[in-house]
Amino acid sequence: MISNFTISGWGAYRPQTVLKSREMDRRHGHEAGWTQSEFGIESRHVADPEETTSMMAAAAARQALERADWGEALPDVIIGGCGVMEQPIPSTATLVQDKLGLSSSGVPCFDVNQTCLSFMAALDIAAMGISTGRWKRALVFASDIASAGLNPDLPKTRSIFGDGAAALAIEASTNPENGLISTATVTHGAHNELAQLRSGGTRLRVTEGHEALVAGSYFEMDAFGIFKAAAKALPGVIERALSDAHVTKDDLACVICHQASAPGVEHVKRLFEPASERVVDIFPTTGNQIAASIPTALAHALDTGRAKPGDKILLLGTAAGISASAMVIKI
């Protein structure tokens, strides 16, 4: 069943500081070009202290709202889909509402979390709310500061992650074909230890000591294990989403995938051969932005015309858990 909405506006924010891979080589004593050769990344953006999660999200949201040109009309809901919240309490969406100058508006705000798939989960909820008539307009965002939790002693994680934010302003559409056509998601919780951040919730507590909290604040990842589990899960959700939407791979204008890693994006391209050029690949200059990866790639596709009104596109990603999700949208 189609959840009828149209993308009225979009925006993206990248931090001002750009960290080049050659600078990483210099810092860590590698030969020039080692990081790019090893991980397929040229540069990524790194947030400065004043560029908080909510600040970046609000900047992207302002762009989306300006493009939407809703005038005095407010969104009926603001949904945050960040991989990692700015702080445990209150929700990041609440902080973004305040930064947008809407703190007295009463617009309901909340966060949803499915790590790297958080934006897709938030968009799914917004689409369902519009479909049921609860909301007419929704502002959905993802913003992540991966650099806050990277262990500088681990080349893989310190090299491939970047910071950034993106947002969509969507509203109910009278076109019966526009919107979310289908979605398919799976989660295999047995893989929960392949990627984790143990601090920031209730698992590690102050009583366990400073060293334990610091250790748990670094992102932990079994890169090969994640790749293997994700590669196994993706074909099934792709097939189910396309089948439910009654479309084929050839019907898709582009594929917006999670920019997890260079091998991860290349694997998605192989899944869509011989039309692998339809897969949007911005990983070399953004890195893995956690939940912000998919909406940032979508904003790029909309900015460059790779995704245009009337197109059918596929949003595709994986997340810690491990989860995989595919979503067919007609924009």
Image: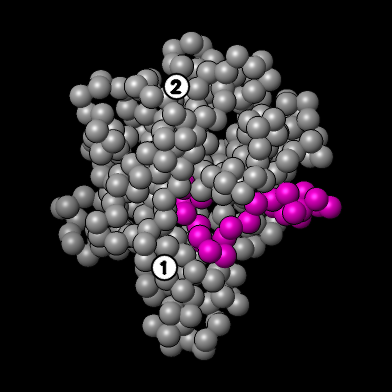
Residue 208, picture quadrant: bottom left
Residue 307 found in image quarter:
top right
Closer to the camera in the image, 198 or 43: 43
Q: Quadrant of the C terminus?
A: top right
When the figure is inspected, residue 162 is found, relative to residue 29, above or below; the finding is: above
Is residue 143 at least partly visible in the picture? yes
- Residue 147 is situated, as x and y percent measured from the top left of the image, at 37, 62
Task: Give the side of residue 36 with respect to residue 109, left or right.
Answer: right
Residue 278 belongs to the span the image colors magenta: yes
Residue 42: where, in percent of width, then height?
Answer: 54, 71
- In the image, residue 60 above or below residue 25: above
Q: Which residues are magenta?
A: 268-294
| SS under mark 2 | strand
Query: Label 1 crowding class (10 Å Cα cut-off): few <14, some 14-19, many 20+?
Result: some
Residue 137: image tag: 2
Q: Amino acid at mark 1?
A: Val
Residue ranking furthest to the top: 133
Task: Decide if residue 285 is on the left or right side of residue 54.
Answer: right
- Residue occupying image coordinates x 50% and y 65%: 160
Residue 192 in view, yes or no:
no
Q: Which residue is more in the foreground, 225 or 47?
A: 47
Quadrant of the drawing holding the N terminus: top right
Kindly give the residue lying farthest to the right in the view shown. Answer: 274
Residue 51, given in percent of the width and then of the height, sits at 29, 55
Question: Could you tell me the amino acid type at mark 2?
Answer: Arg
Crowd tier of the residue under label 2, counting other residues whose Cα lies within 10 Å: few below 14, some 14–19, many 20 or above: many
